[in-house]
């Protein structure tokens, strides 16, 4: 008979949040695969547990290489317990490869539920929690981060992100640029720990706060995009929606058509807003390269705008 893979949730801060089953699984597992064996040792000591099984490391650097070894143990009948530093394995932590490999071999996979930074932050945020989506960590490079954020510009569900403290101010500033400075959000820091803090407010204000420096483990919760009706949107907002799509790689004609369909307006109305903004920029500023206007939504220069068929 094959063994069982057990994904065990571990405390995200307060050790007393450990589920009762966790101690029993740690004591009885044949193999314990831990993201950090030193943290595992501190956890077992705090719980008063003496593991009987073999302990191996299983982290991002050796996950691919160690997965076949653990699958072999499972096929041989072992009970393999997977724990990460905090929270549930495979959720922005090592584990997905092992779960996928076990499922492929028809090995039983179960879990010991535990504390979740995602759900805890959602509950504390004060933002809608009836529908949400987890986006994990954003890319480190600024351009890739902006591109990823633009993919969910019009997402109605509440968004949840993990972020490193030294990148938090840049991430919040990028969110304010893409989602709008007034979009509500909550920064949840050091959840369930001694210095737990939840900072709530508009994205622009949170970015300014984070620029002073923030420490600890961070979860960011962002309000979803509001329901929009075309009649409530002014020309500036229509132009912004088109610009976001253009910057994501769409041609202007396609972007105008997509925005018009999204907000329920005729294409001509969105087109007129874009052309008006471009003409205003061309007649009122010296930016750009002149000629027939820039290629963006609001072209610079002093030339005449090139007609675009909506």
Image (cartoon, helix red, strand yellow):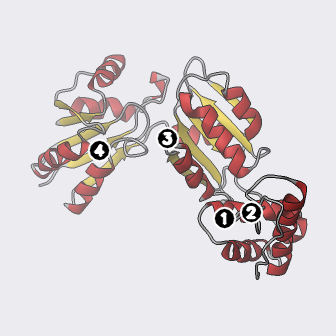
In space, the residues marked 3 and 4 are separated at their CA atoms by 32 Å
Q: Residues within 10 Å of mark 3 (few under 14, many from 20)?
A: few
Q: Which residue is mark 1?
A: 245
Q: Nearer the viewer, mark 4 or mark 2?
A: 2
The structure residue drawn at horizontal position 27% and vertical position 38%, both measured from the top left corner, is: 61
Relative vertical location of residue 128 with respect to residue 155 in this rendering, above or below: above
N-term-proximal mark, 4 vs 1: 4
Q: Nearer the viewer, mark 3 or mark 4?
A: 3
Q: Are marks 3 and 4 in contact (CB under 8 Å)?
A: no
Name the spot of residue 49 as percent of width and height, x first: 28, 22
Q: Are marks 1 and 3 in contact (CB under 8 Å)?
A: no
Name the spot of residue 224 as percent of width and height, x first: 70, 53
Q: Quadrant of the C terminus?
A: bottom right
N-term-proximal mark, 2 vs 3: 3
268 left or right, relative to 92:
right
Q: Nearer the viewer, mark 4 or mark 1?
A: 1
Q: Residues within 10 Å of mark 4 (few under 14, many from 20)?
A: many
């Amino acid at each position: 008979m094959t063994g069982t893979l057990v994904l065990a949730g571990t405390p995200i801060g307060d050790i007393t949040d450990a589920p009762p089953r966790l101690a029993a699984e740690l004591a009885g597992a044949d193999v314990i695969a831990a993201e950090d064996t030193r943290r595992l040792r501190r956890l077992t000591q705090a719980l008063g547990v003496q593991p009987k099984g073999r302990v191996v490391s299983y982290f991002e650097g050796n996950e691919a290489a160690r997965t076949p070894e653990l699958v072999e143990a499972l096929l041989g009948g072992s009970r393999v317990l997977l724990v990460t530093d905090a929270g549930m394995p495979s959720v922005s932590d090592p584990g997905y490869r092992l779960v996928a490999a076990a499922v492929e071999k028809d090995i039983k996979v179960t879990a010991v539920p535990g504390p979740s930074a995602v759900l805890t932050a959602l509950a504390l945020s004060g933002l809608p929690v009836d529908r949400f989506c987890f986006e994990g960590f954003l890319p480190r490079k600024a351009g890739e981060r902006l591109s990823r954020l633009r993919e969910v510009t019009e997402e109605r569900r509440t968004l949840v992100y993990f972020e490193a403290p030294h990148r938090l101010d840049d991430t919040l500033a990028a969110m304010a640029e893409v989602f709008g400075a007034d979009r509500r959000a909550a920064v949840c820091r050091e959840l369930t720990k001694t210095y737990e803090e939840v900072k709530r407010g508009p994205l622009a204000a949170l970015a300014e706060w984070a620029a002073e420096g923030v420490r600890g483990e961070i979860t960011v919760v962002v309000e979803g995009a509001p329901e929009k009706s075309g009649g409530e949107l002014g020309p500036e907002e229509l132009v912004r929606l088109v610009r976001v799509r253009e910057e994501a790689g769409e041609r202007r004609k396609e972007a105008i058509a997509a925005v018009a369909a999204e907000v329920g307006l005729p294409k001509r109305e969105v087109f007129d807003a874009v052309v008006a903004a471009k003409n205003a920029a061309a007649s009122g500023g010296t930016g750009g390269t002149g000629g027939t206007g820039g290629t963006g939504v609001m072209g610079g220069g002093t030339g005449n705008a090139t007609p675009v068929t909506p």
